[in-house]
Structure formats: structure tokens, C-alpha cells
Image: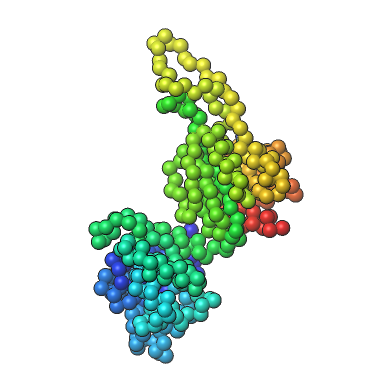
């Protein structure tokens, strides 16, 4: 994907050992389509050389407000006017304090103060020792910077270069990249809470065996990510899959359809949108043995009886919250043929305003897919694309429907 195509980012580096991660971040931003102008403080240049950052960004690095390369000698004005965003990573405790007070005694701080505040957003990725991060002064600065309109990205937890362990590490380059990509997405679901199911369910036969299916969970995870990027609070109820949790998403792992139902009923209380993307097993074994079922040497095979699982989507779509208009429900249909006819029938049967059809064998485990959106007035195709691009399309479509 080229999620940052056409975006020009000023990447500011301040003094801290996390500067080594800024090199990777610079590459990641460029790989995602952005152009990057690096600006470094004197302290940052103690940790990583401007030569490295110039080679990675393919542009001369700026460090001084007296840089004679600018014909008008106003690097702080020229660089900030071109930017779609200024991202300071790493942002030291000292630099946070400087930003807060409107200090402007070096090029980077001068540029932040001189930027057109309504047009050029400022994002910072703090990086410091855990005591410095926890200090009331830093936390006060963080809160005030947010009040002033600065986006303060989170910090990581774990081992620190000083040998201590705790909060305050700079987020990893890929995490920062996701946060920057999310920052630029339109906040069409701000104020909403989306509940999403994803992946297969696992129905136990005994403690070591069970019945499941080939759903990868990728579509549901992409929807959770797209909704979070669009400003929604997101709860993702996931069957057994090994996918990473999208940033900022609250994930609850479940196994069986019954677990999934209980969790969904609880979290639907606070949700305004429910997207059922999970491939829920239609049946579960009538009896789940407490102990492993053993071969007894007789050649006899166990006989499994089945019970139908609860329909999670139909339960929520016909519950009081959805019927009173407080929960917008979206279903999925994975079919092998006659997609339109099956999806149309399923939408009516489940009593949902929107049903998303796809061809099962074309989507399971794949990174891309094609969707057919079916509502009361007909069907619209979303052509083949990556699951994340389709998810963003679907999220925008849901936002339009609930805004009506
Ligand atoms: O009935 P079918 O499984 O084809 O319906 C698919 C849709 O219903 C999907 O949105 C799926 O997540 C949801 N579903 C459910 N609970 C079930 C079966 C399906 O929520 N037990």
C-alpha cells in the first residue's frame, strides 16, 4: 500500500538513544509513499549522524537556523510551509518542555512555533527514561501539549537503554508508521464504538481435539484497524488466530461460538455498530468430553452428535438495542456461487440493514478480496483490492449510512 503517497513529512530528531530507530522510521515513511525532510537538533546529531539520515531520506538534513543554503535564510518558514505534518521522533523530555513553552532557540523548535497551526499538525513520539516519563512535570507537559493541539503518540514499555524497565521507550518504527497513517485517515466514525467479530471459532470435541475452519481473520482484523483509524473505539472479538492486534484496538480472544456470543452480548451494550465478520461454526459437538477420547483397540469409532450454535449476528440484530436503532448491524456471507441471491436472502433472514457478500474460496487466507454490499435497495460491488483498502471502503460506507 502507499498510504502516505503525496504526503510530505518533516521528521524532527531530538537527543536520545532512540534516534537509532528514527533511521528505520524514515525508511518506513518513504516506503509508504511519503517524502521526508529530516531536521535534527544538535543533541540528536550526538546519537546518529546527519549523513545517515541524508542517505536514507535522499535530502540534505537541516540542523541550524543559520543554514545559508536557503536563499531567504528562513529555513524555519520554508520547511514548515511545505509540510503536511511535523513528526518529532524521538521527542526528548527537554524538547517537550521547550515546545510547551514556545521556546525557539534552535531550528526545530523555531519551525514548530512558526508552523501554520491549523494546516500543519505536530505529532510527537516521546522517548525517555521511565522516571523522566512518569515525572509530574513531563506528564503535565504531555497533557498541556495535547490541549494545545499536539498529537502525543504513546510510549512503549520494556527494557530501556539505561538498564531500567518501564514506560518511556519510543514506539517501534512500524507502530509509529501505523499511527501516522491512521492520523491522516478521515475521522468518519469519531464518537462511535464498533464491535467486530473475526476469525474462526473452535468447538472442542475433547481437551485436545476440536472442529474449526479455515477463516484467517484477516478481513475482520482489517475492519477493526480501519474503524480505529476512522476514530471509532473498537472492540475486536477474535476466534483463534495468530494475527497481531491492530494498534489502539481492544481485543478479546475467544474460542467457541458460545464464548463469542457471551462476549458480544456484553460488549454490544456500549457499541453503536456491530460487524460480524467471523466464520462462526454452524454446529458444535453435542458432548465435549472432559478427558481425551482414547482408542480402545476394538476398532470402534466414536459417534459424534451435533447441536446447532447460536447465531450471534441474528441474536444481536434482533435484540432491543438494534431494534431501537442504537446498534447498526452488518453481516458477512461467504458463498461459493450465486453470491447476490444468497447474500440478499441472508440479509433478510438475519434482519440486518447491510450484508457484505464475498466468495469464500477467493478470500480465506488471502490478503485481498472483492466485496458485494447488499442492502434493501440493491447491491454495489467493491472491486478486488487489499483487505485493508476494502475495510476502509466499508467503514466509510457504514459511516455514511449511520449519518443519514
Ligand atoms: O448463516 P451464515 O453463517 O452463512 O451467516 C454468516 C453471517 O452470520 C456472518 O456475518 C457471521 O459472522 C454471522 N454468524 C454469526 N453466528 C453464527 C453464524 C453466523 O454471527 N452462528
Q: In this view, does 105 lie to the left or right of 145?
A: left
Residue 226 x %, y %: 54, 55
User: Residue most toward the front?
Assistant: 136
User: Residue most toward the top?
Assistant: 298
Residue 340 x %, y %: 68, 42
Residue 145's place in the image compared with 324, above or below, is below
User: Residue most toward the bottom?
Assistant: 72
State whether residue 51 appears in this view. no
Query: Could you say which is closer to the camera, residue 24 or residue 210?
Result: 210
Residue 267 x %, y %: 57, 45
Residue 55's place in the image compared with 290, above or below, is below
State whether residue 77 appears in this view. yes
Residue 347's place in the image compared with 382, above or below, is above
Question: Which color scheme did the rendering employ for the protein?
Answer: rainbow
Query: Could you say which is closer to the camera, residue 395 or residue 357?
Result: 395
**Residue at x 25%, y 73% (from the top left corner):** 46
**Residue at x 54%, y 63% (from the top left corner):** 185
**Residue at x 35%, y 58% (from the top left corner):** 167
Residue 388's place in the image compared with 95, above or below, is above
Q: Quadrant of ligand 1?
A: top right
**Residue at x 43%, y 26% (from the top left corner):** 207
Query: Could you say which is closer to the camera, residue 155 or residue 275?
Result: 155
Q: In this view, does 65 lie to the left or right of 380?
A: left
- Total of numbered circles in the picture? 0
Residue 29 x %, y %: 42, 65
Quadrant including the C terminus? bottom right
Q: In this view, does 191 lie to the left or right of 140?
A: right
Amino acid at each position: 500500500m502507499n498510504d502516505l503517497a503525496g504526503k510530505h513529512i518533516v521528521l524532527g530528531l531530538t537527543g536520545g538513544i532512540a534516534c537509532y530507530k528514527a533511521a528505520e522510521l524514515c525508511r518506513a515513511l518513504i516506503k509508504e509513499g511519503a517524502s521526508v525532510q529530516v531536521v535534527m537538533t544538535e543533541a540528536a546529531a550526538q546519537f546518529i549522524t546527519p549523513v545517515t539520515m541524508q542517505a536514507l531520506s535522499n535530502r540534505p538534513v537541516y540542523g541550524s537556523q543559520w543554514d545559508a543554503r536557503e536563499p531567504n535564510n528562513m529555513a524555519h518558514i520554508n520547511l514548515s510551509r511545505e509540510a503536511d505534518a511535523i513528526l518529532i521522533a524521538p521527542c526528548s523530555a527537554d524538547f517537550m518542555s521547550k515546545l510547551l513553552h514556545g521556546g525557539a532557540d534552535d531550528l526545530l523548535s523555531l519551525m514548530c512555533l512558526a508552523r501554520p497551526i491549523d494546516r500543519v499538525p505536530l505529532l510527537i513520539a516521546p522517548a525517555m527514561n521511565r522516571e523522566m516519563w512518569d515525572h509530574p512535570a513531563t506528564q503535565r507537559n504531555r497533557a498541556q501539549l495535547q490541549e494545545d493541539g499536539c498529537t502525543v503518540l504513546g510510549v512503549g514499555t520494556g527494557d530501556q537503554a539505561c538498564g531500567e524497565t518501564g514506560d518511556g521507550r519510543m514506539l517501534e518504527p512500524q507502530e509509529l508508521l501505523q499511527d501516522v497513517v491512521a492520523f491522516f485517515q478521515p475521522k468518519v466514525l469519531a464518537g462511535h464504538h464498533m464491535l467486530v467479530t473475526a476469525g474462526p471459532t473452535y468447538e472442542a470435541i475433547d481437551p485436545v481435539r476440536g472442529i474449526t475452519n479455515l477463516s484467517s481473520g484477516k478481513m475482520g482484523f482489517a475492519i477493526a484497524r480501519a474503524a480505529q483509524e476512522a476514530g471509532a473505539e473498537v472492540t475486536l472479538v477474535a476466534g483463534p488466530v495468530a494475527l497481531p492486534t491492530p494498534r489502539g484496538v481492544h481485543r478479546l480472544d475467544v474460542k467457541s461460538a458460545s464464548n463469542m456470543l457471551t462476549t458480544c452480548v456484553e460488549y454490544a451494550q456500549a457499541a453503536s455498530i456491530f460487524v460480524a465478520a467471523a466464520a462462526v461454526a454452524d454446529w458444535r459437538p453435542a458432548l465435549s468430553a472432559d478427558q481425551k477420547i482414547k482408542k480402545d483397540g476394538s476398532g470402534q469409532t466414536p459417534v459424534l452428535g451435533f447441536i446447532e450454535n447460536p447465531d450471534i449476528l441474528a441474536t444481536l440484530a434482533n435484540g432491543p438495542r438494534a431494534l431501537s436503532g442504537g446498534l447498526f448491524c452488518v453481516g458477512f456471507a461467504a458463498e461459493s456461487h450465486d453470491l447476490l441471491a444468497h447474500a440478499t436472502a441472508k440479509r433478510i433472514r438475519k434482519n440486518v440493514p447491510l450484508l457484505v457478500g464475498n466468495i469464500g474460496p477467493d478470500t480465506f487466507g488471502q490478503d485481498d478480496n472483492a466485496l458485494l454490499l447488499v442492502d434493501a435497495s440493491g447491491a454495489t460491488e467493491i472491486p478486488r483490492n487489499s483487505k485493508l483498502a476494502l475495510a476502509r471502503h466499508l467503514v466509510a460506507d457504514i459511516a455514511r449510512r449511520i449519518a443519514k
